[in-house]
Amino acid sequence: MIWVFPLLLPMIKVDLHSHSTISDGLMTPSELVSHAASQGVQVLALTDHDDVAGIEEARAAAAHNGITLIAGTEISVTWRNRTLHILGLRIDPQHPILQQGLTRVRESRFGRAQSIAQELEKIGIQGSLEGARQFASEGIIGRTHFARFLIAQGHAKDMKTVFKRYLVKGKPGYVPHLWASLEETLSWILAAGGLPVIAHPGRYDLGRTLLNDLLSEFKSGGGAGLEVVSGSHHPEQYGQLAELAQKYDLLASRGSDYHGPGHSYMSMGRLPDLPSQCRPLWHDWEEVREHAA
Ligand SMILES: [Zn+2]
Ligand SMILES: [Zn+2]
């Protein structure tokens, strides 16, 4: 039997990175899942930032739509003075060690939101904390919500422009922040039985040496995979990332990083297959195999 999987699995539509209103997505978990199903996605991971509160609703919606839901989260990490995102996939969302860790990250995120509002006040932009909150329907307030507020107030015309003028290093509203360490993030995900995956590695602008350092540290700390195909990568990056995954013996993942219509680099269900030399993260997942039957 095993010989058929390499042939059939790449044809399954797997999308292992998406956001709902629990973090900074625009659709509720149920809306997101129905949308994914309508786009032909068969296996979807919900990976809200530092939160797992949408998993239960998403799982019920997935059962209703005949698709498979993978429980996930995307954790913000500070590594050598940079912010990285680590996905925890196929986690037990109820695991107390993971839950405690995520609660701590969310609390520190609120402290940062208050500081961002104070920084924006210094340049005459009032009420941004309340303003950002209106765009954060369910919980956390992140930079994306401040960005949406700034656009609504006419300070920038779109997402791209707003992150050139505000909220980034050297610009008003930037607040340096210490997230969780890579080591502790890996330990939370592993404790919850999940697979740690580096999200959109092509987006950090690390340079070759740092990227190699990260991958070897990640692998030796229990890391499992690298997001090779991402909605925020250029197709020309896929090959290089596939090589790095092989070099560090990491499995390859694929995700749209969908945030909602008009707020994403790529629509769901349109993700290209992984490069052929990659070993998919889901190569031995029972729930993916079922879709091949
Ligand atoms: Zn991310
Ligand atoms: Zn994301």
Image: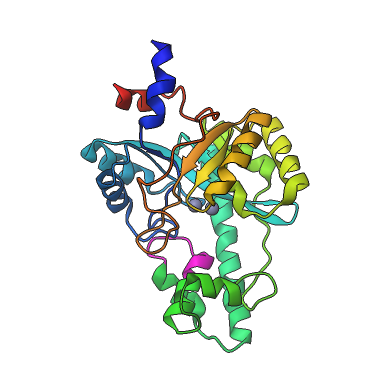
Please, which colouring scheme is shown? rainbow
The reply to whether residue 194 is in sight is: yes
Overall secondary structure of the magenta section: loop
Give the residue at the far front of this rendering: 236
Residue 133 rendering spot, x and y as whole percentages: 44, 71
Q: Which residues are magenta?
A: 136-145
Front residue of this view, candidates 117 and 245: 245
| Vertical position of residue 205 compared to residue 90: above or below | below
Give the residue at the far left of this rendering: 64
Which residue is at a point 47% across and 69% down the rendered structure image? Answer: 145
| Vertical position of residue 7 compared to residue 231: above or below | above
Q: Is residue 225 left or right of residue 1?
A: right
Which residue is at a point 68% across and 30% down the rendered structure image? Answer: 247
Q: Is residue 139 magenta?
A: yes
Which residue is at a point 69% across and 38% down the rendered structure image? Answer: 215
Front residue of this view, candidates 275 and 190: 275
Residue 285 rendering spot, x and y as whole percentages: 43, 24
| Vertical position of residue 91 compared to residue 135: above or below | above
